[in-house]
Image: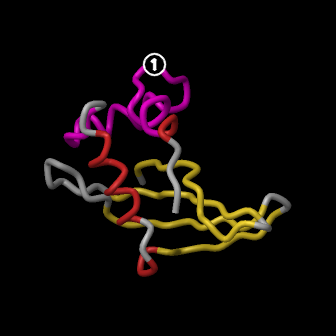
Amino acid sequence: MTIAESKIHGYLLNLDHRKGRHKARVLLACGFTQSSDALLVTALFRHARPSQLVREINDTYGRKYVYEGPLETPDGSNPLFRSVWQSKPDDPRRYFCTACPL
């Protein structure tokens, strides 16, 4: 599984991002910070566990994996989140696409 750094700093924890700012408000309120980005990366990897896989979707870009369940947070509130990952047809690795509170 792979998470691009830009997905963390430029999107999920960026209050100025048009689509990410609402997610950033929730994640920052739960104790994640730009300086402790490794905590969010670890939480997202843990979130994408088999017991939380709710849907797999095949499309022209590959296969999408949708996970839903609690996201482990620094403040212990562990809100319900959805995360989406995708694998390409010629690459079995799963790449992080997005996450949002439920």
Tell me the kind of residue under disc 1: Asp
**Residue 91 painted magenta:** no
The quadrant holding residue 65 is bottom right
Which residue extends farthest left?
75
Which residue extends farthest top?
16
> Residue 77: x, y in percent?
18, 53
**Residue 21 painted magenta:** yes
According to the picture, the residue beneath numbered tag 1 turns out to be 16
> Residue 58: x, y in percent?
77, 70
The correct choice, above or below, for 17 with respect to 78 in the image is: above
Q: Nearer the viewer, residue 44 or 53?
A: 44
Mark 1 surroundings within 10 Å by alpha-carbon count, few (fewer than 14), some (14 through 19), many (20 or more): few
Give the SS element for disc 1: loop
> Residue 6: x, y in percent?
51, 34
Range of residues picked out in magenta: 8-33
> Residue 35: x, y in percent?
26, 31
The correct choice, above or below, for 46 with respect to 74 in the image is: below
Q: Is residue 100 left or right of residue 88?
A: left
Residue pictured at 60% horizontal, 73% vertical: 55
Q: Quadrant of the C terminus?
A: bottom left
Q: Is residue 83 left or right of residue 65?
A: left
Residue pictured at 37% horizontal, 51% vertical: 41
Q: Nearer the viewer, residue 11 or 101?
A: 11
The correct choice, above or below, for 77 with respect to 36 in the image is: below
Which residue extends farthest right?
60
Tally of marks:
1
The correct choice, above or below, for 64 with respect to 56 in the image is: above
Q: Is residue 84 left or right of residue 69?
A: right
Residue pictured at 67% horizontal, 64% vertical: 87
